Amino acid sequence: MTSVPTPIPSRTQFVLEAVKHRILTGQLAPGQALVEVELAAQYGVSKTPVREALKTLAGTGLVVMNQYKGVTVRMVDADMAREVYDVRLLLEPEALRRTVHGAADLDAAREALARADTAADTAERSLANREFHRSLYLPCGNPLLARMLDEVRDQAALVSAVAWAAEPSWEREAAEHREILRLALAGDADGASLALHAHIASFVDRAFPRPQGEDAAL
């Protein structure tokens, strides 16, 4: 029986997910070069799906494509981190408030929190934490709001990966996650929203503190 070649879109998706996973778990560091021919050899594909995957990653803000420097993992600095987290602060607490008001099922959030608590390594914990946050805003009842948060999700995870590499703060954030979920499960929409806002704000303030005397208002 003649084998059927894997369709190019499937190969592209395979490379996309593999490279994204390595970026978001810190295996590929900010500023690291991503060479098409090397990735193609590593994943056993031609350069075409690699090129398409990198274009998609550039569109989500995880990599930067430069005519002269080629493709590199996006660098994370304080300005970039604050821009991404400002979007989260504006949208994510409101999405959670709507999720709680709608009495949405939060089993996925509970399961993600349990996976984070029992994670075997940093990569597994990071992915579980991402799913925890997404499971809070996804059932908000407004698909556009959820998609807007999805659009900054990868960039937020990149910021987190850089911050955690410099100063792990898993235990503090896990405790904050448990409190957010407790309030949400209790039906306290405003309390859960405020706790989530404080959680997001405190993380970026700790990881990327503003220079002394700089106005914190954006």
Image (spheres, rainbow, N blue to C red):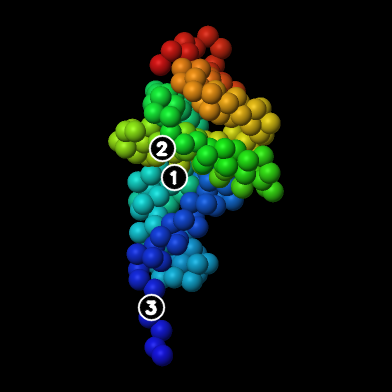
Q: Is 114 situated left or right of 74 in this image?
A: right
- Residue tagged 1: 62
3D distance between C-alphas at marks 1 and 3: 29 Å
- Residue tagged 2: 138
Amino acid on which disc 3 is placed? Pro
Q: Position of residue 43 (x, y in %)?
A: 50, 67
Q: Position of residue 50 (x, y in %)?
A: 41, 62
Q: Residues within 10 Å of mark 3 (few under 14, many from 20)?
A: few
Q: Nearer the viewer, mark 2 or mark 3?
A: 2
- Residue tagged 3: 5
Q: Is 47 situated left or right of 131 in this image?
A: left
What is the quadrant of the C terminus in the image? Answer: top left
Label 3: element kind: loop
Q: Residue at x 63, y 31 (%)?
A: 174
Q: Nearer the viewer, mark 1 or mark 2?
A: 2
What is the quadrant of the N terminus in the image? Answer: bottom left
Q: Position of residue 31 (x, y in %)?
A: 51, 45
Q: Is 107 situated left or right of 71 in this image?
A: right
